[in-house]
């Protein structure tokens, strides 16, 4: 297992649309394990392959309080969505930024599991929001891009300021 580097917004590679996984083989299972390790170490509740610069349709999440229920979805498809949920969202690719977004409260997803078998998964609340957030990454979308132009500009300015400070630390 290995921890993988996470792409940081506004890295243009985060805008890549991920390709479907053709076969869930050992390479894919190793990638899923590495993504899990990377997510737990960060720490985060979800990670899309896009964020580790692998442009395949794979997401992992764990919204359990005990942090021991890793869920992996290969080629996830949203097959039902209902209700509305407002959560403060964050993203490992946009560290330190949290913004409220509205998403579906209840969803149903079809995907392949780590065994390559299709399954359906129903999620609600935080877990549903997390899955929707990660599925957006596979479309090359970062959550801040759902915010108003003004908010996006403020976030970009904040990130640029932080990068400048990081490259020229105050003495
Ligand atoms: Ni994210």
Image (tube, rainbow, N blue to C red):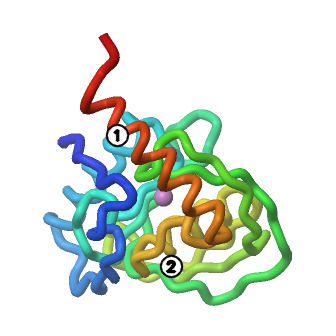
Residue 82 — which label? none
Q: Quadrant of the C terminus?
A: top left
Work out whether residue 166 or residue 84 is closer to the camera in this orientation and state it.
Answer: 166
Q: CA distance from mark 1 to mark 2?
A: 42 Å
Q: Does 92 sit above or below residue 10? A: above
Q: Quadrant of the N terminus?
A: top left
Q: Is residue 112 visible?
A: no
Query: Residue 120: horizontal and vertical position, in percent?
Result: 57, 79
Query: Residue 93: horizontal and vertical position, in percent?
Result: 41, 52
Which residue carries the number 2 mark? Answer: 119
The tag earlier along the polypeptide, 1 or 2, is: 2
Q: Residue at x 35, y 75 (%)?
A: 15
Mark 2 residue crowding within 10 angstroms, few (<14) / some (14–19) / many (20+): few
Q: Residue at x 79, y 69 (%)?
A: 105
Q: How many marks?
A: 2
The extreme right residue here reads 83
Left or right: residue 145 versus residue 7 is right
Query: Residue 132: horizontal and vertical position, in percent?
Result: 59, 71
Query: Residue 101: horizontal and vertical position, in percent?
Result: 72, 63
Q: Secondary structure at mark 2?
A: strand
Left or right: residue 170 versus residue 4 is right
Nearer to us: label 1 or label 2:
1
Q: Secondary structure at mark 1?
A: helix
Left or right: residue 28 versus residue 62 is left
Which residue carries the number 1 mark? Answer: 163
Q: Residue at x 23, y 41 (%)?
A: 3
Work out whether residue 81 or residue 17 is closer to the camera in this orientation and state it.
Answer: 17
Mark 1 residue crowding within 10 angstroms, few (<14) / some (14–19) / many (20+): few
């Amino acid at each position: 297992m290995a921890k993988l580097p996470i792409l940081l917004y506004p890295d243009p590679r985060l805008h890549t649309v991920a390709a479907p996984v053709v076969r869930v083989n050992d390479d894919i299972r190793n990638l899923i394990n590495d993504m899990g390790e990377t997510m737990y170490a960060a720490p985060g509740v979800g990670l899309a392959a896009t964020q580790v610069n692998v442009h395949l349709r794979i997401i992992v999440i764990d919204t359990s309080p005990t942090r021991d229920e890793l869920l992996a979805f290969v080629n996830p498809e949203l097959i039902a969505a209902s209700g509305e949920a407002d959560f403060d969202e964050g993203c490992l690719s946009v560290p330190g930024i949290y913004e409220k977004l509205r998403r579906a409260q209840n969803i149903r997803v079809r995907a392949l599991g780590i065994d390559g078998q299709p399954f359906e998964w129903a999620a609600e609340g935080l877990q549903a929001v997390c899955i929707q957030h990660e599925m957006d990454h596979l479309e090359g979308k970062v959550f801040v891009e759902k915010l108003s132009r003004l908010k996006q500009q403020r976030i970009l300015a904040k990130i640029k300021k932080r990068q400048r400070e990081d490259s020229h630390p105050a003495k």
